[in-house]
Image (cartoon, helix red, strand yellow):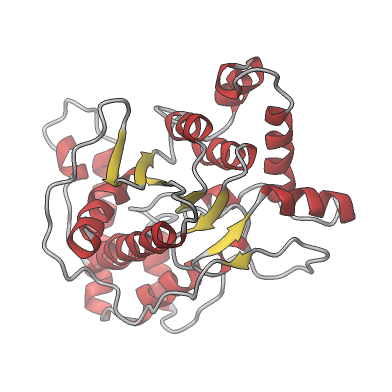
Amino acid sequence: AMFAAPHASSIPRTYAGNNSLARAARARGVIRAPGGGGRRVNRARPRAFFEDQDVEDLSPTTSVTATPDAWTAGTFTKLDDSCVMFGVSHLSKEGAHDAAEFILKTKPSLVVVETAVTSEHGDATGNVLQYEQGVSAMMMDAAAADEALIFVTRLAGMLLGELGPIEESPQWENMKAQLPPEVLVYAAAFAVRATIVYGDRPKAVTIKRLVSTPTLGELDGAFATQSERNYRLLLPDDHPLAAAASERTNDYFEKVIIDERDCVLASTIRECVNKAENGGKVVAVMGVDHVAGVAPVYGDTFG
């Protein structure tokens, strides 16, 4: 498989484009799990960190509160004394290395991610991957192992070969110039021996909810609203309608694609905080569109 896992659920607000809404309207009830087909051989399977989430009703039930103040040292949000959260852009490299460099400097024990390292990593909420699993896969049969896992493991291996601080090394500078933010996070986490926890729910669950829970009218309305938003995203920043592209629409698409997943991510982060051993820290990394939702859900529910 091509190294495409980091953007398997890459654009939270558009979720692989609004064509998914049109397809859902035409094929209600017909679900195909993403990444199907093909034979897998000698893959290093992720193991579960905790039981999967109950996805019957994951819509937010708490009131919206202001996002907690970010620590002055960086562009991240402090959820509590044990955990900070970064929002990264899936479409640009602006601030892309902040989360990865924070991981390199602070060496957390757990890194919760919205996008899975591999397709199998994203099969269940709470699945984990560690550097040792990648090394083991390479030693057993690198040609048959998951390409994404091998790629990230090799990146981490190169970083571990640096004599000085990794974040100050020429190797790291080269990686920052070439790699997307999620891959930098994966490599940094492996380099400090942090466990990478898949924090989102499986894509198949989200797609199933999207096609089975709204009425056709709600689905059609969501398609129209999100299509309008996509066109506004193409407008110049100084256009009077451009700002409206960032406003919430509160349609069924946002409920399923954003709000419900915000609750899953917040719950996973809390599970990791509870399970971190010996005072270990947790760093959460997700798309920027989830930060404003995850922070108040985490604070209202677990604060």
Residue 155, given in percent of the width and then of the height, sits at: 69, 35
Residue 258, given in percent of the width and then of the height, sits at: 30, 59
Q: Which of 234 and 151 is in front in this view?
A: 151
Left/right of residue 237 with respect to residue 36 in the rendered view? left
Residue sitting at 40 percent across and 57 percent down? Answer: 273
> Looking at the picture, does residue 254 appear above or below residue 179?
below
> Looking at the picture, does residue 90 appear above or below residue 35?
above
Residue 217, given in percent of the width and then of the height, sits at: 22, 77
Q: Which of 83 and 34 is in front in this view?
A: 83
Q: Which quadrant of the rendered structure holds the C terminus?
A: bottom left
Residue 255, given in percent of the width and then of the height, sits at: 25, 66
> Looking at the picture, does residue 131 appear above or below residue 219?
above
Left/right of residue 140 with respect to residue 262 in the rendered view? right
Residue 273 in view here: yes
Left/right of residue 17 with respect to residue 51 in the rendered view? left
Left/right of residue 238 with respect to residue 235 in the rendered view? left
